[in-house]
Amino acid sequence: MSDKEFKVIETQEAFDQAIAGRLKREQEKWEERVKQLEQEREEKEALEKQVNQLQEELSAAETSTTEAQKKNESLSSQISDYERQQLRTKVALEHNLPYSFASRLMGDSEEELKQDAEAMAEYIHQKPVAPLKDTESPEANGENAVYQNMLNQLNNEGE
């Protein structure tokens, strides 16, 4: 037969001795499993802490990115306003309009601004029209009526 023969266990002490090795191995196995779970829990907590920290950093980065985009849009808007005002001033001065009239020019492109400046220049730079001949009678002018009458007679006789 084999070296391991079946022994009949007749007492409690013999039973305890027979299963003590198995119980010890099983207890060591569960203690190792508990240690492993404890280690995994600590790793999980560390990873959760890292995730929270990274989320805060991401949130801060998104906030700063949003602020930078708003500032960029604001500065771009200011630049385009300055360029538009510079173009208006240039067109106004090209058409001999006063500097203060540059802000009154309407249009988005240089051509539209030039058309508006030309139209405005026509009104501002009109040639004075000679006054019409006085149609009132010489009596209506009072003291100078006599002299006016004499001048009219000289002009008529001279022709």
Image: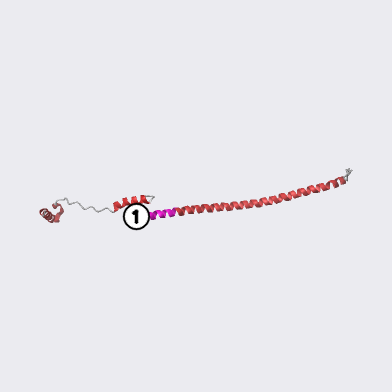
> Which quarter of the figure is the N terminus placed in?
top right
Which residue is at a point 65% across and 51% down the rendered structure image? 47
Residue 49 among those drawn in magenta? no
Q: Position of residue 104 (x, y in %)?
A: 35, 52
Locate residue 78, reporting x and y percent: 44, 54
Q: Quadrant of residue 95?
A: bottom left
- Number of disc labels: 1
x and y percent of residue 124 in the render? 29, 53
Residue in the image at 56% along x and 51% along y: 59
What kind of colouring is applied to the model shown? Answer: secondary structure
Given the image, on which type of amino acid does mark 1 rest? Ala
Which sits in the foreground, 135 or 79?
79
Category of crowding for the residue at label 1, using alpha-carbon neighbours closer than 10 angstroms: few (below 14), some (14–19), many (at least 20) = many
Identify the residue at image location x=42%, y=53%. Answer: 80
Q: Secondary structure at mark 1?
A: helix
Looking at the rendering, the stretch of residues picked out in magenta corresponds to: 77-88
> Is 109 displayed left or right of 148 in the figure?
right
- The answer to which of 142 and 33 lies nearer the viewer is 33
Q: Is residue 74 left or right of residue 90?
A: right
Question: What secondary structure predominates along the stretch shown in magenta?
Answer: helix
Going by the image, does 130 lie left or right of 117?
left
Q: Residue furthest left?
A: 157
Residue, disc 1: 92
Q: Position of residue 99 (x, y in %)?
A: 34, 56
Q: Quadrant of residue 11?
A: top right
Residue at (39, 55) in percent of width and height: 86
Q: Quadrant of residue 125?
A: bottom left
